[in-house]
Amino acid sequence: MRRIIIGGAALAAVAVLAAAAYGAAGSSRSVTLTLWHNYGTGGNAVATKNLVAAFQKQNPDIKINVVSQPGGNYFQLLQAAWIAHTAPDLSVQWTGLFDTKYEKQLLNLKQYFTPAELAKINGAKWSSSNFNPAQGLLVMPLENQFYMGFYNKALFKKAGVTSVPTNWTQLFAACTKLKNAGITPIVYGADPQAIGPSPYPYYDLSYIASGLFSPAQLKGLYTGSTPWTAPALVKAVSNWASMPKKGCTNSDVLTKTNILGAFMKGQAAMIVDGNWDTATLREAMGAKVAPFLPPFTDHPQHGVVQYSGDGFAVSKQSSHQKEAVQFLRFLMSPTAQHIIAAAGLIPDIRGYSATNPLANQMLAFAKSGKIAYPMIDNVIQGDVVTTGMKQLDAALGGNISAEAALKSMKQTHDALPAEQRGPVYH
Amino acid sequence: MTVQEAAAELPNARRRARRSPLAAQRQRMGILFTLPVAALIGSLLLIPIGQTFYYSFTNWDGFTSQWIGFAAYRHLFNTPEFVTVLENNAVMVLAIPIAVALPLGVAFLLNTHIRGWRFFRSVFFLPTAVSWVVIAFVARRFFDPDKQGVLRSLLDHTGLGFWHPDLLGHEHSALLAVMITFVWSVFGTNMIIFLAGMSTIDQEIYDAAKVDGAGSFTVLVRITFPLLKRFVSFAFIISLITAFSALFSLIIVMTNGGPGYGSTTLEFFIYEKAFTESNFGVGATAGVVLFVLVFAVSMPLLRLLRSDD
């Protein structure tokens, strides 16, 4: 009997040890995630690299393999990977309609983040299903971005422009003074972000729209309840398109290259761009450069185009969703926010500031009661964006009227399938 | 053997030829050796072409597709910008005769072995070795209306400084700039095709013409050109296919298809629809239209060529 008891006890001990060993082996099992980004080598890429390193340090069992994909065909590659079921666990996504477009492929994060947590994220709305955080976050924003204007304080002073223009009348008056002083007021040309030779009209159109509509009314442009040919919009875009003729811009608005360089060299007094160039501008121009809200409105701007343009999402195909979500959760931590700010980006979690003075000035605008507007190209249909890029540029170049450009955008919108202009964002 | 007997024997001879073991073996081996290439072409070319035809009748967005039949084509042809795009392609056709005639004339001059003909042959052929993207950047610089623009500088230095054409900045002239660049970039290829063709013409024909008192122009029109007909047809088709389906890099860098739709060709339109807007179905539909257009223009020329042979 004693032998049996000892034997039984020994067996039980072996079983317990085996179970413990199995458990220990299970907990030390490492997981490798793959992360794709299209950031190239800029600040976002630096932030991503440092975020991954910090996350891996905190979670030694999770390794993230970072893959830098070409920016030009990033979404085509991602789409092909989804079709082939070889998609990465984590991928950089743009927000707005760019992520709802891939909603079927992205993990809805509703069950992973509480409403209180979502409330801390500036861009939660535009990163969520149907732009409603209650329906679930699709993308964890990496940074806060601004479309914004920059002006050269020294050139304003030289031309006798004593205050920053806040509406069309003041802008045209400032243009006259600058022009009389031999200074190009606003420089337009090939978008510094792109290889293509065309200006990017959506920086300006975002501010034109913010001067006319509330953020909620912007949805009307998506559904068609506010037509692209609305008289107020035609009038505002006509004002904008008349700038070259009124001497407010350089004459070669469609073909000029290196406009950022021209602005930095003092060849123009203003430029409309985004916060991603703040570090470059600050370094080149020091205290001479300051931000302003593009005054494409009849009344002083009540809004600022502040938007979380990009972030990370988890693929539904990932076999390590839990670990991938863990990385997204890490992005909200103070450690991550400091890494993001140190890389020159504007953190998207409320309560954190940027390191660049120009970016902080924009944040101050946003905090001073200005309403945050989305980048309009992220909340209108891609087909309409493409048409607008061509036709608005043509209008700015004096090839067609503003009304014709907007009519063309309306035609593109009207030709879309009904579900792409319905009450639910797709 | 009489003629009648020989005629009666002929079918038997044919039957014997068909039954020849060597011929049968050759035929089997021929099929065997052709199979890999046929399989390769079938899988890499014919299947994708077939798929494109299928998807051209759908609203494929890259993930899901729904059969919509001829509505896809109706929708495409009712799109105003598509009509503009087709017009642009029609205008592009006007560049083809120039892209053929200019190198033909220069090849004729070089073929007479004028002084420094080897140097000029190399210089004229040089653009062929340059990538389209580089050519496009050079062209942008050339047409830039700013002070750094080569064209403007040329005009300034030749007493025409009052005229500063901004070809890339206007909807109705951007395509002209693309066409000029296209003619320049295919110049070398076409010139080499013609030089190769001219080298096949018997020198004795030229000598006989000279004896008969024919001048250079007469030789070009009456001898060289007729004997080069096949090469001209070939250059025409190659240039057409290039103009319709190989200028994407040129357009995206030079004009991005604009201003407006001023320089958007069918090929560029397909890219925008499929890869910018993820409307792969529309892209496939436009792709089929492009295929049909190139086919429709090329086939009569090929038939002409075949009849000459």
Image (spheres, coloured by chain):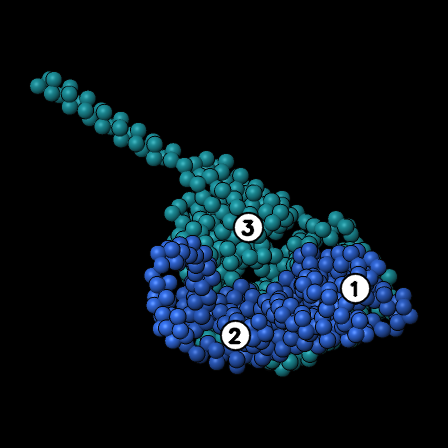
Residue A135 figure quarter: bottom left
Q: Nearer the viewer, mark 2 or mark 3?
A: 2
The answer to whether residue A89 is above or below residue A269 is above
- Mark carried by residue A69: 3
Q: Amino acid at mark 3?
A: Gln
- Note whether residue A338 is visible: no
- Mark carried by residue A178: none
Residue at screen point 73% across, 53% down: A281
Total number of numbered discs in the rendering: 3
- Mark carried by residue B292: 2
Question: In the drawing, does residue A174 fall left or right of residue A340?
Answer: right
- Which residue lies most toward the left here? A1
Dot 2 and dot 3 within a common chain? no
Q: Residues within 10 Å of mark 2 (few under 14, many from 20)?
A: few
Q: Residues within 10 Å of mark 3 (few under 14, many from 20)?
A: some
Q: Position of residue B100 (x, y in %)?
A: 69, 70
Q: Position of residue A403 (x, y in %)?
A: 65, 80
Question: In the drawing, does residue A373 fall left or right of residue A85?
Answer: right
Report in which chain the residue with disc 2 lies.
B
Give the residue number, with chain letter if any, for mark 1: B112
Dot 1 and dot 3 within a common chain? no
Residue at screen point 40% across, 49% down: A318
Residue at screen point 51% across, 58% down: A76
Q: Residues within 10 Å of mark 1 (few under 14, many from 20)?
A: few
Which lettered chain is shown in blue?
B
* Label 1–label 3 contact, CB within 8 A: no
The residues tagged by marks 2 and 3 sit, at their Cα atoms, a distance apart of: 35 Å
Q: Colour of chain A?
A: cyan
Q: Nearer the viewer, mark 1 or mark 3?
A: 1
